[in-house]
Image (tube, grey):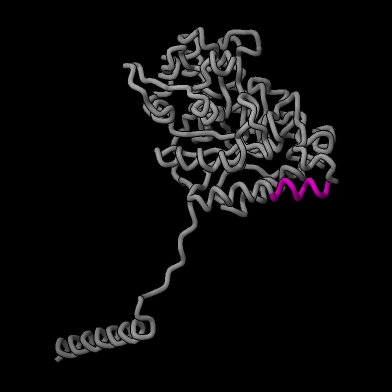
Amino acid sequence: MNKIFVQLRQIFIVLITLTTFSCSNAQNPEGPKTTPAEPTVPTTFAFSKGADVGWLPQMEATGYKFYDTDGTKKDCLQLLKDRGINTIRLRVWVNPSNDKASGHCSPAETVVMAVRAQKLGMRIMIDFHYSDTWADPGKQTKPAAWANHSFTELLNDVYNHTYEVLNSLKAAGVTPEWVQVGNEIPDGMLWPEGKSANFGQLAQLLNKGYDATKAINPAIKVIVHLDQGNDNRRFRWFFDNAKANNVKYDVIGLSYYPYWLKSDYKATIADLANNLNDMVSRYNKEVMVVEVGGDYTLAQNTKDMLVAVINAVKNVPNNKGLGVIYWEPEGEKSWSGYQLNTWQSDGKPSPALDAFK
């Protein structure tokens, strides 16, 4: 009897469940409604091996051709991917000119390049300069459209520009994994209002970029970026002030160019490694070399330098060293005039790039 009772009880439960499901579907014949998922960024750790390729659209527009080592003409991004590159970094300017070397990189062009890179399976970093052209330690010129704005208006400018660019990317199906708020800013950005001598105002500007980024997707990691990544004193000064002024960020970005230090990388690589480790332990942040470069005429030396930098970042404890990005490897000298590319005069990639394999 007990077995029969249990069986009858199970049949009753099944009938009730089926009846409830049937009624639910009768009210909603198309089935349960679902909300489209937000674009997401990776949550598992994978070391980033990257290239900044802001010149690439201009190079292609002027007819420059890229070739593999066997002489086959190929897409530059594919050539980079074949050498282990998995990340593309793209600078964005507010209202740039059409100048070959110091123009382009508009929001619209950035979206096109990001979509193209993502289709090849690349991860994306967006580098906001908050200028119409190059921003770096020696120049942080406000966009012409913002030139006469008050500080309050500049805060809105930073938020709106950041949000609009990232929203355009999102609409195109791209959510960057990283967003850089400012480019090489040891002395601040949007001068004079955002100079680091007035760190309180700089902090507000940085936080507007952070807030706009997180409004698009809170999983995007925000980078604050300084040059001279081997200079621990420089980094401590800046990020101590950032902490005191409640700057919000996720990652400390570093540039490392031994060439500009007028020394071989072997003289400064230990300082870079020490600085990476100190930034993690002192501020509990992740670190990333977002710009690196070496002399294109010294391919083996540049390759050895890249191997050393990659190892230094990988050796940061607890996967807090996120990756290494080469600045404009494709910018071959005859086209760009830039000494620190990794491309040969025949349009083929330099063996130095094999460091990323």
Q: Is residue 153 magenta?
A: yes
State the residue at coordinates (67%, 32%).
Answer: 97
Question: Can see residue 65?
Answer: yes
- Name the quarter where the C terminus is drawn: top left
Q: Could you tell me residue 33's position as x and y percent?
A: 42, 72
Residue 286, compared with residue 84, is above or below; it is below
- In this view, the residue in front, 313 or 64, is 64
Residue 34 location (% of width, % of height): 43, 69
**Residue 356: which quarter of the image?**
top left
Of residues 5 and 41, the one drawn nearer to the viewer in this rendering? 41
Closest to the observer, 106 or 215: 106
> In the figure, is residue 72 to the left or right of 90?
left
Specify whether 317 is left or right of 261.
left
**Which stretch is magenta?**
151-160
Residue 6 drawn above or below residue 230: below
Report x, y in % for residue 142. 77, 36
Whole-percent x, y for residue 174 in the image: 49, 47
Query: Where on the picture, by quarter, is residue 245?
Result: top right
Counting labels gives: 0
Q: Quadrant of the N terminus?
A: bottom left
State the predominant SS element of the stretch in magenta: helix
**Residue 209 colored in magenta in the image:** no
- Above or below residue 37? Residue 344 is above
The answer to whether residue 283 shows anywhere in this view is no
Going 29% across and 87% down the picture, which residue do you hit? 19
